[in-house]
Amino acid sequence: MNLHEYQAREILRRHGIPVPPGEVATTPGEARASAQRLGGKVVVKAQVHAGGRGKAGGVKLANSAAEAEAHARAILGMTIKGLTVHKVLIAPAAAIASESYVGIIVDRGSQRPVLMVSPAGGIDIEEVAAKTPEKIHRLAVDPRYGLLSHQALGLGFALYGDVHQARAAADIMQKLYQVVYAVGASLAEINPLATTPEGAVQALDAKIVIDDNEVERRPDIAALRDVTAEAPEEVAAREAGLTFIKLDGNVGCCVNGAGLAMATMDLVKYYGGEPANFLDIGGSSKAQKVVAALRIMTSDPRVKVILFNIFGGITRGDDVANGIVQATHELSLKVPIVIRLTGTNEGEAMEILTKAGFSALTDMDEAVKQAVALAKGKAA
Amino acid sequence: MSIFIDQSTRLVVQGITGRDGSFHAKQMMAYGTKVVAGVTPGKGGQRFEDSVPVFNTVAEAVHETRANTAVIYVPAAVAASAIFEAADAGLELIVCITEGIPVLDMTRVLPFVHERGARLIGPNCPGLISPGKSKVGIIPGNICEPGKIGVVSRSGTLTYEIIHQLSSHGMGQSTCVGIGGDPLIGTNFVHCLTAFEADPETAAIVLIGEIGGTDEQQAADFVRRNVSKPVVGFIAGQTAPPGRRMGHAGAIISGASGTAAEKMQALEQAGIGVMKRPADVVPLLKSARI
């Protein structure tokens, strides 16, 4: 789950990290009022879950409150990577002496949170990492002891020669590490960590990604979710306990397990079709989940056929079969359904499906070929 | 032989009275796995299916029944705690089926398990099966046949698909291991490849990976240096859209994008036969003269 920049900044502030003031505006008028309070010379920043906001025209410098209002009018409602901007952050345009990078990510390789810092921060940090990897300093933190003071200070000196600035940066790193465990983040990033001409060290921009598995046990974090910033069918899928990603094809795929779901999409393509989506109904599937899955898939008029590929393990075939039958009672399905079902409780599942007038296959290749042929027939 | 589990496996089921735990405990018992104990706090003293003793704690279960392996079916909110408990009770092998464990919980679990000398498989995995000997987890036993192919996979149901292909063409399996799809897992491809290479009853290995991370590239590198047995591989996600970006840090840390194309190339360069679809597994193994 992504947080907006303004939410991430607020979390950092609450953990004692110096962050310049800022206000959120949802209308050009609010943007103007905020800019006036902040002294007129401000940055107007689109709050949207997409990278490359600046390059897309979603970040603008304003020299006056009137200009801030004009920029907000242009940015609010614009689309960046398919997502509509509903909010802007208004922050004072600070003079910057230097830009560094500080980030913490849970690393698969070392199986630890890894702190990465670079004196070459800013928007081109990935290029810095690719071309001059020696400018990125890394430390795998032992979670039993946390980020130790001397470790943080060592990295502070990698950023700044001045001892006061190095200490300030070290303090920020230790607090950022605490933020990770406090909010359940899989990523926490300050870019840039800036110095002002007076020498103060401040977090100018922040990005926090929450591990989706943390949200349920943290109601305060769950409350930060902005559903208006997400694709509507993905919101519906999540609420039903499904993982759904929209694609451009016409073969709707409903599969149990992420690996098999991807392999099914790959096989649709292999036989000349185009998958309409990635959809994993997960383990322990209740019938109601299948109903939700069918509702989401059939809401897209481009979908010409629905392909079920179920290999029962912890998912029971009879649960899925009941779901398909129930869904056909609840929804008026206009597209054909191809079912491949095998594994746990296959016998019971076949009985349920046959009674309801469905036929099911047990071979994956055969089912995919049939679905692709149906999609092409309807499309023609 | 086989790897990790066989007839000597004595299993304790954590969460044996839950919906999934009870269902799969019965399936494992029917398969012939020695299920010697169950654990559900508050239900100590009961018997599961009139035979398996249920205990309040894993330590009691181990003390009373000499269990050497645990399988975990408890909900995600208490699963990390269940792994800690199993490792503390001295079990050699812990298999965690539960999905949805926060990754930060795993940063604390893994060093704890490692220090106690236990092997963790998973979390978020289907477990493992040594056909004809023992099954720990949820892999459907009826699709497996005893034989000499070792299977290791990051996926759950895709593993079943490949096993199904093998069995229906007379290619039995020594052991099939689902290592789990989470970012932080206890047992990786290299651990399983090492065990399969050392197992005299395994003649060839099937490796099933997917997009994300660089585990498959490391496995390919290990195969090139250390594995003498034929290996064939599959990578799921050839048509997946480019993954959601994890800020800048994700790109900086791996230096790789984790695409299927990248991984398939790494496998090919290591001399691994790469499948285009699951049904290719049998012809590829046959061409390696298995």
Image (cartoon, coloured by chain):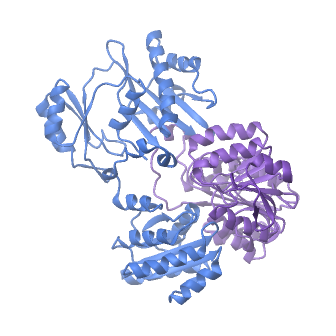
**Chain coloured blue:** A
The image position of residue B22, as x and y in percent, is: 69, 65
| Residue under the point 57% across and 40% down | B104
| Residue under the point 57% across and 78% down | A340
Count of labels shown? 0
Q: Is residue A106 left or right of residue A71?
A: right
Q: Colour of chain B?
A: purple
Q: Nearer the viewer, residue B241 or A346?
A: A346
Q: Is residue A359 left or right of residue B122?
A: left
Q: Is residue A118 above or below residue A350?
A: above
Q: Is residue A271 left or right of residue A69?
A: right
Q: Nearer the viewer, residue A60 or A331?
A: A331
Q: Is residue B96 above or below residue A182?
A: below
The image position of residue A244, as x and y in percent, is: 45, 61
The quadrant holding residue A284 is bottom right
* Residue A376 in view: no
The image position of residue B5, as x and y in percent, is: 82, 57
| Residue under the point 41% across and 45% down | A2
The image position of residue B205, as x and y in percent, is: 76, 60
| Residue under the point 75% across and 43% down | B87
Location of the C terminus of chain A (image quadrant): bottom left
* Residue A57 in view: yes
Q: Nearer the viewer, residue A118 or A335?
A: A335
Q: Residue furthest top?
A: A163
The quadrant holding residue B6 is bottom right
